[in-house]
Image (spheres, rainbow, N blue to C red):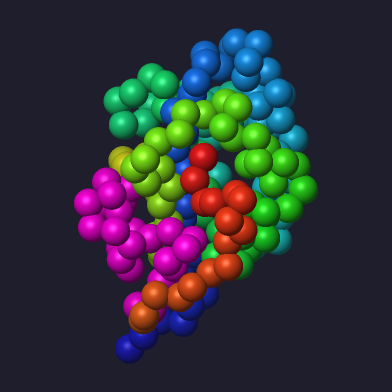
Amino acid sequence: MNEPLSAYELAQANIGRLKFPLESAELKDFVDALDPVNATSDSAEGFVWRLQSDTGNATDVPVLGDDWLIINMSVWRDTNALTAFMYQGQHRELLARRRDWFERVREAMAVLWWVPAGHRPTVAEAEERLLHLRAHGPTQYAFTLRTSFPAQGAEPVAVDVPEDLGCSV
């Protein structure tokens, strides 16, 4: 018997390779915006949870064994809630400036996957899902906003993502 869609929530991880050290003047605007953007996400419709360390963000959480990478990981009700947050307000403004702060990387740096409601994914899970996406492309196991899959497993669902912003850092 299939569980209802509400039995699942959408996990997302987005990894970025910094151009400069976090404490540098070049990243000041980015770092200064972290707390306000996180506060906005925490109160956004459909937001469930986000990864954070004692700093209140996740910039000091190790990912893929590379000190120049930072991770953003969160759980949302569904792709619509995540997309609504990503492409509006201050987050949209920061997303438009991502090339000022992050290196352009050819391989996938963002991944989505469904988790049982109440599950909080680990960085190891995110790394494994991202590596799977890189190796196999979008599947129900690991996918993107552009090629999204419903929790119950069906054909890919096209999501309208603005071309000027993309869906990775």
Q: How many marks?
A: 0
Magenta stretch bounds? 129-153
Q: Nearer the viewer, residue 23 or 2?
A: 23
Instruction: Please state if 73 lies on the left or on the right of 83 as rendered.
Output: left
What secondary structure prevails in the magenta region? loop
Viewer can see residue 36: yes
Instruction: Please state if 133 lies on the left or on the right of 56 as rendered.
Output: left
Quarter-of-image position of residue 153:
bottom left
Residue at x-position 30% and y-position 25%? 65
Q: Nearer the viewer, residue 26 or 82?
A: 26
Expressed as whole percent of the image width and height from the top left, the position of residue 118 reads 48, 59
Most distant residue in the top direction: 24
Residue at x-position 52% and y-position 14%? 21
Residue at x-position 31% and y-position 66%? 139
Q: Is residue 81 above or below residue 150?
A: above
Which quadrant, please, contains the N terminus?
Answer: bottom left
Residue at x-position 65% and y-position 23%? 31
Expressed as whole percent of the image width and height from the top left, the position of residue 39 reads 72, 41
